[in-house]
Image: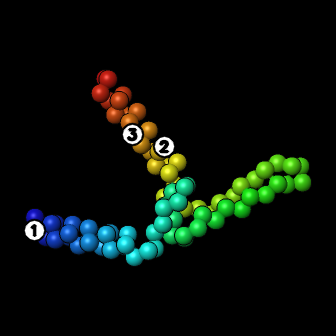
């Protein structure tokens, strides 16, 4: 049991140190390892607008969808 607590402390210290190293940034789409949110916006020859963005480490949309899924599953389990 003592070994488990030591590992958890080490993991917590490592996670905190990674967050404060300046390698992780929060932007309007999620969490990224780049300071600026790189999106390329353009219109094609038909006049249709396109926006292509570099992927983030964590996308807020995927987190939101996951939370909704877990919420709905928990709600179903409680109602049965």
Q: Earlier in the sequence, mark 1 or mark 3?
A: 1
Residue under circle 1? 2
Residue 45: name its quadrant.
Answer: bottom right
Residue under circle 3? 70
Q: Tell me the SS state at disc 2.
A: helix
Q: Tell me the SS state at disc 3.
A: helix
Instruction: Residue 57: tell me if it is visible.
Output: no
Q: Residue at x 15, y 66 (%)?
A: 5
Neighbours of disc 3 within 10 Å: few (<14), some (14-19), many (20+): few
The answer to whether residue 27 is above or below residue 9 is above
Neighbours of disc 1 within 10 Å: few (<14), some (14-19), many (20+): few
Q: Percent position (x, y) of residue 61?
A: 52, 48
Residue under circle 2? 65
Q: Nearer the viewer, residue 74 or 15?
A: 15
Q: Nearer the viewer, residue 63 or 3?
A: 63
Neighbours of disc 2 within 10 Å: few (<14), some (14-19), many (20+): few
User: CA–CA distance between discs 3 and 2?
Assistant: 9 Å
Quadrant containing the N terminus is bottom left
Q: Residue at x 29, y 27 (%)?
A: 78
């Amino acid at each position: 049991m003592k070994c488990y607590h030591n590992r958890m402390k080490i993991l917590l210290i490592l996670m905190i140190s990674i967050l404060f190293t300046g390698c992780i940034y929060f932007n309007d789409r999620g969490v990224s390892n780049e300071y600026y949110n790189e999106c390329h916006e353009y219109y094609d020859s038909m006049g249709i607008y396109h926006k292509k963005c570099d992927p983030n480490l964590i996308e807020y949309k995927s987190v939101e969808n996951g939370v909704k899924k877990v919420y709905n599953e928990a709600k179903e389990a409680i109602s049965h």
